[in-house]
C-alpha cells in the first residue's frame, strides 16, 4: 500500500499553502492603520483616565514581579 504525501517533494503537483511571513504592501498599510488606531485609543484613554492606567500598570508590574520572584 502506497501512502500519498500531499506536501512531499516526491509529488510535484502538490502545492503548499504555508505563508512565508511576507506581508504585501496593502496588508502592511492595513496593519499600520489598525495599530495606529489602537495606540491612539489607548493614548486618549490614558489622557482621560490617568489614575486607572497608573493602577493597571502598577498591578501588572506587581504581578510580573511576584511571578518572577527575584528574591
Image (cartoon, rainbow, N blue to C red):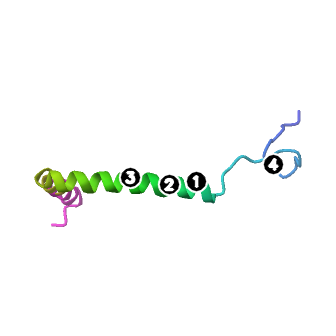
| Residue bearing the label numbered 1 | 27
Secondary structure beneath label 4: loop
The reply to whether callout 3 and callout 1 are in contact (CB within 8 Å) is no
> Label for residue 37?
3
* Residues drawn in magenta: 58-71
Q: Earlier in the sequence, mark 4 or mark 2?
A: 4
| Residue bearing the label numbered 4 | 8
Q: CA distance from mark 3 to mark 1?
A: 15 Å
| Residue bearing the label numbered 2 | 31
Residue 65: x %, y % from top left: 19, 60
The reply to whether callout 4 and callout 1 are in contact (CB within 8 Å) is no
Give the farthest residue toward the top. Answer: 1
63 part of magenta stretch = yes
The quarter of the image holding the C terminus is bottom left
Q: Earlier in the sequence, mark 3 or mark 1?
A: 1
The quarter of the image holding the N terminus is top right
In the image shown, does 1 or 37 lie closer to the viewer?
37
Q: Earlier in the sequence, mark 3 or mark 4?
A: 4
In the image shown, does 16 or 67 lie closer to the viewer?
16
Q: Earlier in the sequence, mark 2 or mark 3?
A: 2
Q: CA distance from mark 1 to mark 2?
A: 6 Å
Secondary structure beneath label 2: helix
Q: CA distance from mark 4 to mark 2?
A: 33 Å
Amino acid at each position: 500500500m502506497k501512502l500519498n504525501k500531499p506536501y512531499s517533494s516526491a509529488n510535484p503537483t502538490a502545492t503548499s499553502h504555508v505563508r512565508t511571513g511576507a506581508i504585501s504592501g496593502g496588508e502592511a498599510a492595513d496593519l499600520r492603520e489598525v495599530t495606529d488606531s489602537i495606540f491612539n485609543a489607548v493614548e486618549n484613554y490614558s489622557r482621560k483616565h490617568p489614575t486607572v492606567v497608573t493602577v493597571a500598570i502598577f498591578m501588572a508590574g506587581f504581578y510580573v514581579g511576584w511571578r518572577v520572584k527575584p528574591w
